[in-house]
Every structure is written in C-alpha cells, then in structure tokens.
Amino acid sequence: MKKEVIVIGGGIIGLCTAYFLNKEGHKVTVIDKSDISFGASFVNAGYLTPSHIVPLAAPGMILKGLKYMFNSSSPFYVKPRFDRDFLKWAWYFKKSATKAKVQKAMPIIKDINLLSRELFETMAASNELGDFHLERKGLLMVYQTEKEGAYEQRVAERAKAMGLPVNHLNSSEFKDIEPYVDINAMGAFHYLCDRHTTPPQFMNRLLEYLSKQGIAIRKSEEVIDLEVSDKKVNKVITNTGVYMADDIVFAAGSWSSVLSQKLGIKLPLQAGKGYRIDVQNPTGITMPAILMEPKIAVTPMQGFTRFTSTMEFSGINQTIRKERVQAIAKGAARYYEGLQIPKTAIDGAKSGLRPVSPDGLPYIGRSTKYKNLIFATGHAMMGWSLGPATAKLVTELVSNRKTTMDIMAFHPERKF
C-alpha cells in the first residue's frame, strides 16, 4: 500500500529517506526549518566508516569529559552548565560506557555501516544523482605517540576479527601511500573498508534529484506543533501551513528531541557540535586521515581539503568558538610538514550539530506511543555514513516489510 509520508528534517537522513520512499512509490513531503544549505550534513568529514566500530560511549570517555570540561579548546568539550536533560543524558552515557555494552554494540555498528556503504555505492552506480564524488582509498588512523598507537592496535585487531581489512604502516611507509606530503607521525593503521565523499556536492545533487522527482521540499518552514488523536499524529502544523500524512518521520537531527517533547516523549539526545575548516589552495594531501591525538579528521574533497574536529556539548546553538577552530589548524600543522591554513579559511569556519544518543547507537524505529511515528535520528558522528542505511530501514517500516537487519538495538524507547 502506497502512503503519504512527512519527513521532518532535510539533512542526509531526511533526504535519503525521501529518496528511498520515493523509490517505492510513496508520496513524500520534506519539511526543514532551514534552507538546507548548512549544518552537520554539509560540514562533516564525508566518511563512510565501517571501521568506526567503537561507539562514542566507551570506557574512559566520562573521565576524558571531566578532564576537558574547563578547556574549551579540547577535542571533547562539555560546557559546564546545570541542565536537567543533559545531566540525565550524561547519566545514561555513563551507564552505557562499559566494556560489555561496547562489545555488544560493535558488530551492530559494523553491520549497519557496511549496509550503508553498499547503498552509497549502488546510488553511485545508478548515476541518478550524476557522477558524485565517492573514493575507495580507505582511511588512515595516524598516531604520534605509543599510547594512541597501542589503542588503535587493539581496535584494529577487533576489526580484523570482524572481517574488516586493515594494514599497519610505519612512518617510512607513508611515502608510498601519501607521496606529496611529509607526515610527522610514528605510524598509522590503514582501514581499507572505508570510503570518502564530498558532502555539499552529494547533498546538492540529492536535493536536485528529489525536486525533479516531484517531491515536495518545504524549506525555511518550522514545525511549531503536532496534533494527535487515537494514538496517531494526524496533523503537522508549521509556521506557514498544516500537513497530514499516513506516517511521520522524525529525522530532524538534534532538534528531534525538541519535537518529541511536543508529543510528551522524552528522547535522550544531545547536540554534539563539530567544526570544519575548508582549505581551497592545494595541500598535497590525497588520503583521508584521522589524526589521533588531537582527534582531527582530514579529507581531500573535490576542489578543497577539509579539516574537521571536536565534540562540543554546549546545547543547541551555532556559536563558533574561535579557540576550537584555532586548535584544529594548529593540530593539523603538527602532523603535516609545511601545512599552511590561510586566515581566510580559519575565519570561514562553520559548525554543525550532531544528534548524540547516550549509547552511541542511533534511534531507528516506530514509536509505541504513536503508531504512525517513526524515529530516524541520534547518529552522532556516523550520521553521514549511515544516511542511506537508515533511510532504507525507515522505508521498510513504512512499507510494513521485514527490515534488512534487526533494528531492536536502535529502538527509540530502549532502556539505558
């Protein structure tokens, strides 16, 4: 049965959901409070990362957060504040950050990432969006200290045990894989399973394709209320109109918790801010890499090199903290000999808010409170990587089909 579906949120999750729903003949309306030209889906590192098998809620992260709390330029920054929802989320995070829960989560994270990578590649092969950037060079995890090298060695061993190919490179072997720059590091682990893209290009191609397919995309339109009856959301009320549909999908990223509160649902979710610097002049960098000590991601995109970093918990805001941007520029320069990041690039830094669940797993599934409400949010730093997979799973829920993979671990009402 074909349905009318409203997707609230025009980021990578929402637009991919519209793409897959349209493929199955459903009538889709996308509503977003922005003009869909900025935010996390436009400023991320562009990675497809089956290698990222360890969730953010891992043992030791709480201590790191406390350590960094009063250093606003640290990679993992929590702004000191009294906020009841944040404190509750932090308590759930602490409960999730155990070895047993991480072990349980890793194969689930791997499987949904592999599914999403396959769907990205299928979309590329179809050429429906045009020849968008998708490279298969893998990802380097680059370290300067023995401590970080030993940590990544343990992750690499787990990845290999799960069937993910990874090689270790010493400092002299960098030249073979990254010939045009000198990297100041002890070594790196090369995950061959990963891919990288250029997010603004993909988002704009996807928007153009959806518009040509006749999908209604309501930009700069904010959902201000939701009307319910008989355990269903029967009206979506925006600042300019009223909409009705068979199914409603919450794919609004960090704002999904705000929407949920309108329905009396307390979705544990916090906005994790990240920053990006785009360098237009040639850098010589050809390989995507994560610089482990400062937690900086480096991506050679089409026409520029992107440097992204940080996880900042300071609430929902788009404030640019200059000290955090400077930390990215200085951190990258410590790894790449002679790297010059122009002041114009630093001044042009942008931020994006990533929706972070307490256990590092996304929220994908139907609500038990409202039978036509589906959640698709909470992806943290894997939102870009998991866009197509989340969209496929949501489409299967809308179509009342068995999902491609078991999604019980992603249930939006799971216990922490």
Image (cartoon, rainbow, N blue to C red):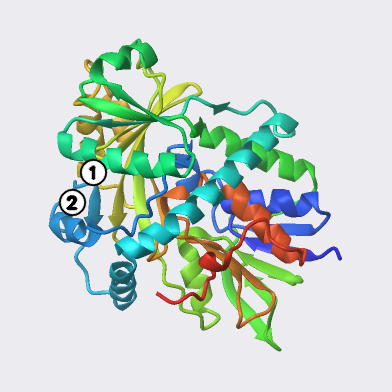
Cα separation, mark 1 vs mark 2, equals 7 Å
Image vertical order of residue 118 relative to residue 65, above or below: above
Residue 190: x and y, percent? 38, 28
- Residue at disc 2, secondary structure: loop
Please name the amino acid that badge 2 sits on. Answer: Ser
Question: What residue does disc 1 label?
Answer: 324
Q: Residue at x 72, y 39 (%)?
A: 209
Q: Which mark is residue 349?
A: none
**Dot 1 and dot 2 residues touching (CB under 8 Å):** yes
Seen from this angle, which residue lies furthest right? 1
Would you say 384 lies left or right of 395 here? left
Tell me which label, 1 or 2, sits earlier in the chain: 2
Considering the image in quadrants, where does the C terminus appear? bottom left
Residue 136 is situated, as x and y percent measured from the top left of the image, at 53, 26
- In which quadrant of the rendered image does the N terminus lie? bottom right
Q: For numbered disc 1, what is the local secondary structure?
A: helix
Is residue 130 visible from the viewing direction of this image? yes
Amino acid type shown at disc 1: Arg
| Side (left or right) of 16 relative to 135 | right
- On the image, numbered disc 2 is attached to which residue? 72
The image quarter containing residue 245 is bottom right
Q: Quadrant of residue 94?
A: bottom left
**Residue 40, x across and y down, in percent:** 46, 48
* 137, 261: nearer the viewer: 137
